[in-house]
Image (cartoon, helix red, strand yellow):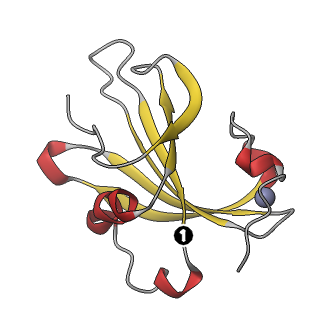
Amino acid sequence: MIADQNCLCHQPPLIASGYDIHMIGIDTTNGRFGEVKILMCKSCKTSWLLYQVEYEFISRSGRWYRGIMQPNDFKTLKPETAEAYLESLPWYFVGGSVFDTIGKLGKGTLSLDM
Ligand SMILES: [Zn+2]
């Protein structure tokens, strides 16, 4: 699958109405309550893996990571493996109040804990 880099899904911020959203589950690693979802872009059909976590008792703690996912990997994806999957990608979008951005390019280790 070739992602259309001109599509809106490659331009943060994320507009939820542009995607078919599938909830994968909750990652409870380290006491997190991380929401793991797959978002399929309605326009270019790119699939994105989204990991979102926020600590409600800490202000400005929200963060998310969104990276392109290969459809072949859907079956093996679990909430607990989403972090490693995103870290294995050459790049992803990262954002949230903790980073004070609507989304920017990133790669490597995720910062999901408090
Ligand atoms: Zn798209």
> In this picture, is 100 found above or below 63?
above
Residue placed furthest toward the front = 90
Total marks placed: 1
Taking depth in this image into account, of 56 and 96 the one nearest to the observer is 96
Taking depth in this image into account, of 54 and 45 the one nearest to the observer is 45
Residue beneath the point at 80% across and 51% down? 18
Q: Quadrant of the C terminus?
A: top left
Q: Quadrant of ligand 1?
A: bottom right
Q: Position of residue 94 (x, y in %)?
A: 48, 38
Residue beneath disc 1: 69
Q: Is residue 44 left or right of residue 99?
A: right
Mark 1 is surrounded, within 10 Å at the Cα level, by few (under 14), some (14 to 19) or many (20 or more) other residues, namely: many
Q: Position of residue 27 (x, y in %)?
A: 28, 56
Q: Amino acid at mark 1?
A: Met
Instruction: State which quadrant residue 15 falls in.
Output: top right
Residue beneath the point at 17% across and 53% down? 29
Q: Position of residue 7 (x, y in %)?
A: 83, 53
Residue beneath the point at 28% across and 37% down? 111
Secondary structure at badge 1 equals loop
Q: Quadrant of the N terminus?
A: bottom right
Residue beneath the point at 46% across and 45% down? 65
Q: Is residue 27 left or right of residue 39?
A: left
Residue placed furthest toward the left = 30
Instruction: State which quadrant residue 41 falls in.
Output: bottom right
